[in-house]
Image (cartoon, rainbow, N blue to C red):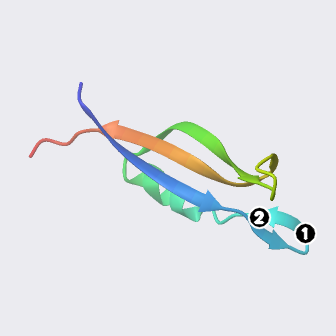
Amino acid sequence: MVFEYMDRMMMFENTPEGLSADMGWLQEAGKDGWELVASVPLIAPNRDGVAYGTVGCHFILKREKRAV
């Protein structure tokens, strides 16, 4: 089986309810055959270069490569 891969970075938004993100794109990707295989938090550094918080996420998806 041969796969193709896609990645996407998503940044969190600060809302009155807390951090939020629009995940509707992930449901649409799933309808198109994409499967989430990994997610990695995006950590922001402070002025001293020390990590202080998660600001988003990097997603990696795959699906079976379609015949051309």
Left or right of 5: which side holds 40? right
Image coordinates of residue 23 in percent, x first then y, are: 62, 60
- Report the residue marked by disc 1: 17
* Residue kind at label 2, given as amino acid type: Ser
Residue lying farthest front? 48
The residue singled out by tag 2 in the image is 20
Q: Is residue 55 above or below residue 60?
A: below
From the viewer's perspective, is 51 left or right of 16?
left
Q: Which residue appears at 23% of the width and 29% of the height?
A: 2
Label 1 neighbour load within 10 Å: few <14, some 14-19, many 20+: few
- Residue 58, numbered circle: none
Residue visible at 24% across and 24% down? 1
Q: Residue at x 60, y 59 (%)?
A: 10
Q: Position of residue 36 (x, y in %)?
A: 51, 40
Q: Nearer the viewer, residue 38 or 48?
A: 48
Q: How many marks?
A: 2
Residue 66 coordinates in the image, percent (x, y): 19, 42
Q: Are marks 2 and 1 in contact (CB under 8 Å)?
A: yes
Amino acid on which the number 1 mark rests in the picture: Glu
Q: Is residue 22 above or below residue 37?
A: below
